[in-house]
Image (tube, rainbow, N blue to C red):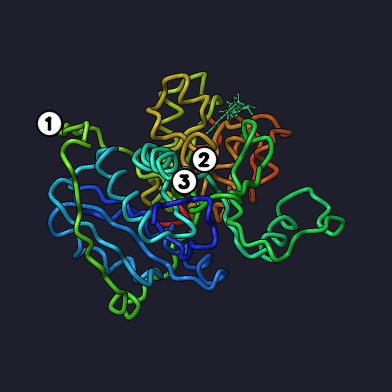
Amino acid sequence: MAFNSAEINGFSDIWVFCEQRDGVLQNTDFELISEGRKLADERGAKLVGILLGGEGISRAAGELGGYGADKVIVCEDPALDVYTTDRYCNVICDIVMERKPEVLLIGASNIGRDLGPRVAARLHTGLTADCTHLDIDMERYVQFLRESSTIDVDSVKFKMEDTNLKMTRPAFGGHLMATIICPRFRPCMSTVRPGVFKKSAFCREKADACEIERVEVRLEDAALKTKVLEVVKETRKMVDLIGAEVVVSVGAGISRDPKKGIELAEELAKALGGGVVGASRAAIDSGWLPSDHQVGQTGKTVRPKIYVALGISGAIQHKAGMQDSELIIAVDANESAPIFECADYGIVGDLFKVVPLMTDAVKAAKEAK
Ligand SMILES: Cc1cc2nc3c(=O)[nH]c(=O)nc-3n(C[C@H](O)[C@H](O)[C@H](O)COP(=O)(O)OP(=O)(O)OC[C@H]3O[C@@H](n4cnc5c(N)ncnc54)[C@H](O)[C@@H]3O)c2cc1C
């Protein structure tokens, strides 16, 4: 029977597209599988990962079970080794049309942002891009609104039996959060920001119990419009902001001497223990650091153990990327800078004077131990 995305009752299960690069699963896969597990439990559904890659990729699939996948569908073919839009889109759409998942989640990486809209258009369903929160269960969603919105939840009559995926994302430049549903078509599709969801603890038993299904891939040359001739990798090492336990970020406050400001941040990050340097968009736009250092709504979402903001005023778009950090320390010359609203410790002063003192104090405390 022909696939019809509007016949919504025929769809079930929560699916996660699992991205690999050079045969290595990405952190976003584990974050999305962990979050997908919660959604599958709320819906009483199975959680299925879908993994495409070149020869040997099926060996990586079991790991996804360790984070909560009940099953992983593996499409292994040399032609899927390197991502191309049309190959991946064709393969995924064929399987989705046949199996009909109710939800399809994709990491909002460069690949996911390219793949998601193409798949959604082909399937004729909706896609909410760059989500930061997901719910199915209404009670959990109402609780989320109670904790993180200004809505007077008790005066609103919610449809508690609603089982649509509720996809929340920043809107209007981060000034408000919008929850979007896709009630008339399936699957409900969402791309999800890397680093937003926590990965759960890995469980060896679950990894061993995970069902792996290999699916034969049909790739007809006529349908493929792109060919990978060569992969050229950028040699510059990108900063691993999302995985870092300590992030020391600089903002426009270093403008008096950007080079010195970055040096001070690097020294503090090193003293605190293998930290990395992040930045506000103002610092990136000024050309002081490359864009992979940007923290915030249009940069990376981080949740390190320690986040230090140096000369960053704390615009809502910056906070969106760091406010869930375990401990936040802010240094700013302006005592009413909004960054102090989310900081656990705030120091009002000139960062060029304060940061060397902080670094010395950290070093001295470590030596004294
Ligand atoms: C759609 C959209 C998306 C955006 N996405 C992002 C994003 O992802 N990330 C992001 O960061 N921003 C983002 N922005 C920009 C954001 O709105 C702010 O403009 C930006 O975060 C400001 O950066 P800043 O705090 O470094 O600069 P400013 O707001 O100029 O703050 C500089 C701070 O430095 C302090 N200062 C100055 N000199 C010193 C000194 N010597 N010592 C100590 N403190 C000093 C000042 O008191 C001030 O508080 C976005 C904006 C839009 C509209």
Q: Please provide percent x and percent y for residue 124.
A: 47, 43
Mark 1 and mark 3: Cα distance apart in space:
28 Å
Q: Earlier in the sequence, mark 1 or mark 3?
A: 3
Along the viewing direction, whichever of 31 and 188 lies nearer the viewer: 188
Query: Could you tell me if residue 314 is visible in this image?
Result: no
Q: Residues within 10 Å of mark 1 (few under 14, many from 20)?
A: few
Q: Quadrant of ligand 1?
A: top right
The residue under the point 66% across, 46% down is 342
Along the viewing direction, whichever of 284 and 127 lies nearer the viewer: 127
Q: Please provide percent x and percent y for residue 340.
A: 68, 41
| Residue, disc 1 | 229
| Residue, disc 2 | 357
**Residue type at numbered disc 1:** Leu
**Residue type at numbered disc 2:** Leu
The quarter of the picture where residue 350 lies is: top right
Mark 2 and mark 3: Cα distance apart in space:
43 Å
At numbered mark 2, what does the secondary structure look like: helix, strand or loop?
A: helix
| Residue, disc 3 | 191
Q: Please provide percent x and percent y for residue 77.
A: 15, 52
